[in-house]
Amino acid sequence: MILDTLDNLGNYASLNPLFAEAVHFLQNTDLAALEPGKIVLEPDRLVVNVNAIGPKTADEAKLETHVEFIDIQVPISASETLGYTPAADLPEAPYDAAVDMTLYEGKAANYFTLQPGMFAIFFPADGHAPGITPTGLKKIIIKVKV
């Protein structure tokens, strides 16, 4: 997992062959103006999801992991709390290949808050529980093929 500010996002472009395009999108797009929906930058490899998320508590947030994709998550309209537990510390659970997701019961081991202007990168080894917010928010999730 990586946490940082969008000002430093370019420092991570070399971590994956598709990260440079994701960085370019985030640095050259008016993110606040985007409407909820999906933007395909490279079919089946690099997809931007613009999500409007309603209020959610830590008890309601499910831990998840992915196998095929890395998440770059960016809160836009408000702060967002996320849970984190290393995947190695999570119990076995069924993987749904159709949506590239494993969901886990229970709460995360750790929590942190992202402010607008920050981002988190979650790799397949990172269990994360996104979307914890008392008021709801708009956020960007870029799905990057591993």
Image: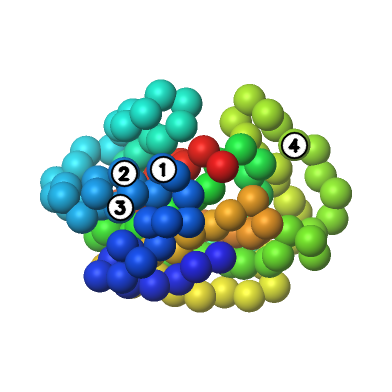
Residue drawn at the location 29% of the way across and 66% of the way down: 6
Q: Amino acid at mark 3?
A: Val
Q: Quadrant of residue 79?
A: bottom left
Q: Gap in Å between the C-alphas at discs 4 and 3? A: 29 Å
Labelled pair 2, 1 in contact (Cβ < 8 Å): yes
Residue drawn at the location 41% of the way across and 35% of the way down: 46
Residue drawn at the location 85% of the way across and 49% of the way down: 92
Q: Residues within 10 Å of mark 1 (few under 14, many from 20)?
A: some
> Label 2, on which residue?
21
Q: Gap in Å between the C-alphas at discs 4 and 1? A: 24 Å
Labelled pair 4, 3 in contact (Cβ < 8 Å): no
Q: Position of residue 34 (x, y in %)?
A: 19, 42
> Label 3, on which residue?
23
> Label 4, on which residue?
95
Of the numbered discs 3 and 1, the one sitting upstream in the chain is 1
Q: Residues within 10 Å of mark 3 (few under 14, many from 20)?
A: some
Q: Indicate the secondary structure of the residue bearing disc 2.
A: helix
**Is residue 44 shown above or below 73?**
above
* Numbered label attached to residue 134: none
Labelled pair 2, 3 in contact (Cβ < 8 Å): yes
Q: Amino acid at mark 1?
A: Leu
Is 50 displayed left or right of 68 in the figure? left
In the orientation shown, which residue stands out farthest toward the right? 92
Q: Indicate the secondary structure of the residue bearing disc 4.
A: strand
